[in-house]
Structures are given as structure tokens and as C-alpha cells.
């Protein structure tokens, strides 16, 4: 198939590249010429394991192309994926200007049948708005070119996005005409040869499915964080509690790990947007999700509280941070707990030396020439001159450190572990004060 993907962020670039990988002719459009320059020179503008090699392979094979030419992109694909950003507005709602702008460009320039696929995470009712935007542009031109609108939400985890796309556990397609459904089945056939994974719904149900999935996962995280805080006060061990409830097949083990809060491009934004949609479109207050958001905002400051309890006045103190990205295997700093922690430490008069395998460049872009924040070239390098170590992101390389070396390097043998990476007894037997979450 000839496919156009509008947007070369996480969703667009991964989707377009994986669709090219199975033999389709894919053209990726972006209005940012710098992104297209990077892609055409063999680089990628994001960090995602395995993606760069796949991009280069499909470019070399002639199946994957990049452009800033909107008309060329509209003419290319029978299937037009809209995978642009939907950033939160000031009121928490999703900003649809880029989605609707892409839809209007398609309506303004299309000359034959198109299937327009909403791949971006969009509120319920966006499919109708996209349909109306295209219809309006066609009416202005005085033409009646046929088209279909489909909702096809993504369920990609940053850091494992390529694997998730190539081996999906489900493919949700919201469509209301048979021709579009037929084309989407054909498009996704290579990804479900083992067994049928495609679920066909109406458009609104597909849109809500995406928000519901992220809201459920965020709820599990905030629930476990609150239990961890309770366990700590009561003298229980949240890790034992996690194993106890996770063994129940109705609950399972996924997303039951307590920590210092969730972040990233999806959970915070989507929880806010779903709360706002319920308020504005249905006059319903989503009490559980409101509490989920409040709990997560508070959890991002739990490490700060532990540090202040241990050291008291932090003025003049210096802390080592391991991990800056909101999760491992990504350089994404959006809503990352590290940002709140760094801001808290600065406000208390402390300074920071940070290490992250891939996110330090993005952190420098965010914090600029902040003199209170230094960057180390290794985990151990971050510990030089530090009063304590704070772990914020659970990168694999942090899992088995040399505790004797940590103890010898730090001014004070203290670790604050925001991801519960270690056995408390083992660390404490090494002569290190160890503060975890709920343990």
C-alpha cells in the first residue's frame, strides 16, 4: 500500500517505519525541516531502541521516504495517518489544532479516495471533527471526493515501541464503513499472522479505549504509590504486598511497582484530558482519576521529603542523581519526576550532579545554563563530592552497582531509591543508609 504518515514524533516515525518494514511504500511528512534533514542524513530526532537501524534499512530499500511537501504527502498515500502532537491546553484539554490542521490539508489537496486515520491520541468526538474539517475543505473546492475517517489509537510503550508495533497484543480500529475496515484489515494483516488481534469498534469507542487504557495504568501506579506510603508508616514492606496481590490473576503484576511518580508524554496528559472531556462534554466528575492525578503530583515530592527528613537544612548540600528520563530506554523528559526533584532541591539551596545514559542532552535543553546542575559522564562520576545518591530512573545499569565504591565515594553513605532497585537488608548491611519507597 501507499501510506502517508503526518508527523515524525514517537508515534509517527515508529508507525511509518514499521509499516515500511513489512513492504509498504511510506512517505513521512513533517513541517519541521530540521527533523526531515536529520532523517534524510540517516539520523533520528528521537531516542528509541532499534528504530534507527530500521529507518536506515527501509530508506535504503526505497520503502521509506521523508518530506516537508504537504501536497506531495497528500497525493502519495491512499491511507493518511495523522500522528501529530496533541499537547495539553492550559485547561488540561487536548489541543487539536495540529490534528485538524492536518485534516484540512488533506481536504484541501486530495484528488482521490483517502482513508484518514487518527493515530494521535485524541478526545472522544475528534473523528467527527476531522470528518467535518475535510468536508469543509472539499466544499470550498466544490468537489465531492470520497473519503473515510478511522480511529486507530496507538498502544506503544516508549523504549519498546518498535517491538510493540511489530508484535501488537491488540489493534483497535474504529470505523463505520466497510471499505475503510477492509483496507485497515489488509494493512495490519502482516502483524497478526499468528492469530486475529484486530478489534473493530465504532469511532468514539476506539477514541475512548485509548484514554481508558492509559487512565487504568496510571490508576494502578498511583494506587500502589499510596499503598507504599501507607506501608512505610505501618512498618509493612510494599514489595511483599506487591507479590501477594500480583499473584491474584484478576490483578496481575504489571504496573504494580511503586516509585516516585509517573511522567512522560502520555499518562499525565491523557488523564488530564479525560477528566476535562468528562467535565465539558458529559458534565461528569471523574473522582477516581482526579485522585489519581493528585496522588501522582504529590508522589513526585516524596523523595524530597525523605531527603529533608534525613539531612534537615539542604542549603549548601550537593546530591548525585541517577536517572533523568521519566522511564528507562527513552530520553523523554516530559513530566519526568526528576524535574520536580531538581526544582525542589534548588529551592532548598542544594546543587545537583546528574547522570543518565541518554537523557542528559534533553535535560540541558530544558534547564539551559543552570549553574546548580552539573552532568557526569558516568554513574560513579556523579557521586564525586555528593552528600547522598538519589535514584530516579530504573536504568538497567543501576541495578548491580559496587556498593563499597558508592560508600567510599559519597560524603555520607546514604541512598534514596525512588524505584526500589535494591534489597534493603543487603544495602544496609553494606553500611549504607537506604531509603526506598514503602520498604
Image (tube, rainbow, N blue to C red):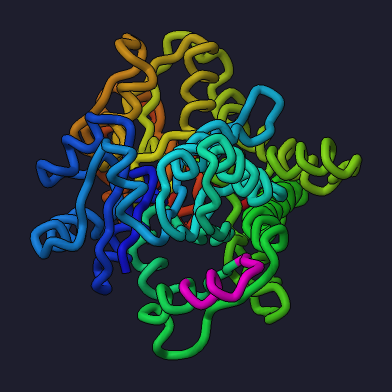
Q: Is residue 413 visible?
A: no
Does residue 363 lie above or below 238 as drawn? above
Magenta: main secondary structure: helix
Question: Which residue shows up at 54% across the image and 38% down it?
Answer: 137
- Residue 244, percent from left and from top: 68, 73
* Count of marks, rendered view: 0
Quadrant (top left, top right, bottom left, bottom right) of the N terminus: bottom left
Q: Nearer the viewer, residue 7 or 74?
A: 74
Q: Is residue 210 left or right of residue 47?
A: right
In the rendered image, residue 182 lying in the magenta stretch gets the answer: yes
Q: Which quadrant of the view contains residue 152? A: bottom right
Question: Which residue shows up at 84% across the image and 45% down it?
Answer: 286
- Residue 146, percent from left and from top: 53, 58
Does residue 61 lie above or below 362 as drawn? below
Q: Nearer the viewer, residue 32 or 414?
A: 32
Q: Range of the magenta residues?
A: 174-183
Does residue 40 lie above or below 386 as drawn? below
- Residue 22, percent from left and from top: 27, 73
Q: Is residue 205 left or right of residue 410?
A: right
Q: Residue furthest front?
A: 142
Q: Is residue 424 left or right of residue 26?
A: right
Q: Is residue 100 visible?
A: yes
- Residue 201, percent from left and from top: 67, 70
Q: Nearer the viewer, residue 181 or 298?
A: 181
Amino acid at each position: 500500500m501507499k501510506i502517508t504518515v503526518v508527523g515524525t514524533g514517537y508515534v509517527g516515525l515508529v508507525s511509518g517505519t514499521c509499516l515500511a518494514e513489512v513492504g509498504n511504500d511510506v512517505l513521512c511528512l513533517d513541517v519541521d525541516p530540521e527533523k526531515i534533514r536529520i532523517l534524510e542524513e540517516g539520523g533520528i530526532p528521537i531516542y528509541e531502541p532499534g528504530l534507527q537501524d530500521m529507518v536506515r534499512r527501509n530508506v535504503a530499500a526505497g520503502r521509506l521516504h521523508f518530506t516537508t511537501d504537504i501536497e506531495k504527502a497528500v497525493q502519495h498515500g491512499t491511507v493518511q495517518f495523522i500522528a501529530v502532537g496533541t499537547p495539553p491546553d492550559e485547561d488540561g484539554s487536548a489541543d487539536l489544532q495540529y490534528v485538524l490542521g492536518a485534516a484540512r490539508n488533506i481536504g484541501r489537496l486530495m484528488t482521490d479516495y483517502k482513508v484518514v486515520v487518527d493515530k494521535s491520541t485524541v478526545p472522544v468526538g475528534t473523528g467527527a471533527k476531522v470528518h467535518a474539517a475535510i468536508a469543509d475543505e472539499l466544499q470550498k473546492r466544490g468537489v465531492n471526493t470520497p473519503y473515510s475517517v478511522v480511529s486507530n489509537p496507538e498502544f506503544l510503550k516508549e523504549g519498546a515501541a518498535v517491538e510493540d508495533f511489530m508484535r501488537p497484543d491488540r489493534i483497535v480500529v474504529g470505523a463505520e464503513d466497510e471499505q475503510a475496515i477492509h483496507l485497515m484489515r489488509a494493512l495490519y494483516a502482516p502483524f497478526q499472522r499468528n492469530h486475529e488481534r484486530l478489534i473493530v469498534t465504532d469511532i468514539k469507542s476506539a477514541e475512548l479505549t485509548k484514554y481508558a487504557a492509559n487512565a487504568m495504568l496510571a490508576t494502578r501506579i498511583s494506587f500502589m504509590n499510596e499503598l507504599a506510603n501507607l506501608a512505610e508508616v505501618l512498618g509493612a514492606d510494599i514489595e511483599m504486598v506487591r507479590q501477594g496481590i500480583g499473584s491474584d490473576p484478576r490483578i496481575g503484576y504489571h504496573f504494580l511497582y511503586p516509585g516516585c511518580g509517573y511522567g512522560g508524554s502520555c499518562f499525565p496528559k491523557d488523564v488530564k484530558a479525560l477528566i476535562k472531556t468528562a467535565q465539558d462534554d458529559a458534565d461528569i466528575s471523574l473522582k477516581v482519576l482526579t485522585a489519581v492525578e493528585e496522588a501522582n503530583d504529590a508522589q513526585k515530592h516524596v523523595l524530597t521529603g525523605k531527603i529533608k527528613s534525613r539531612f534537615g537544612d539542604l542549603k549548601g548540600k550537593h546530591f548525585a542523581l541517577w536517572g533523568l528520563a521519566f522511564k528507562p530506554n527513552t530520553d523523554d523528559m516530559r513530566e519526568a519526576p526528576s524535574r520536580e526533584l531538581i526544582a525542589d532541591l534548588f529551592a532548598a539551596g542544594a546543587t545537583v550532579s546528574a547522570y543518565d545514559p541518554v537523557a542528559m542532552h534533553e535535560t540541558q535543553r530544558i534547564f539551559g545554563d543552570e549553574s546548580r546542575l552539573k552532568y557526569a559522564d558516568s554513574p560513579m562520576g556523579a557521586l564525586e563530592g555528593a552528600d547522598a545518591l538519589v535514584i530516579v530512573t530504573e536504568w538497567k545499569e543501576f541495578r548491580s552497582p559496587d556498593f563499597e565504591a558508592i560508600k567510599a565515594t559519597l560524603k555520607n553513605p546514604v541512598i534514596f531509591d525512588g524505584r526500589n532497585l535494591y534489597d534493603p537488608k543487603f544495602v544496609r548491611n553494606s553500611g549504607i543508609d537506604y531509603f526506598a519507597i514503602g520498604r
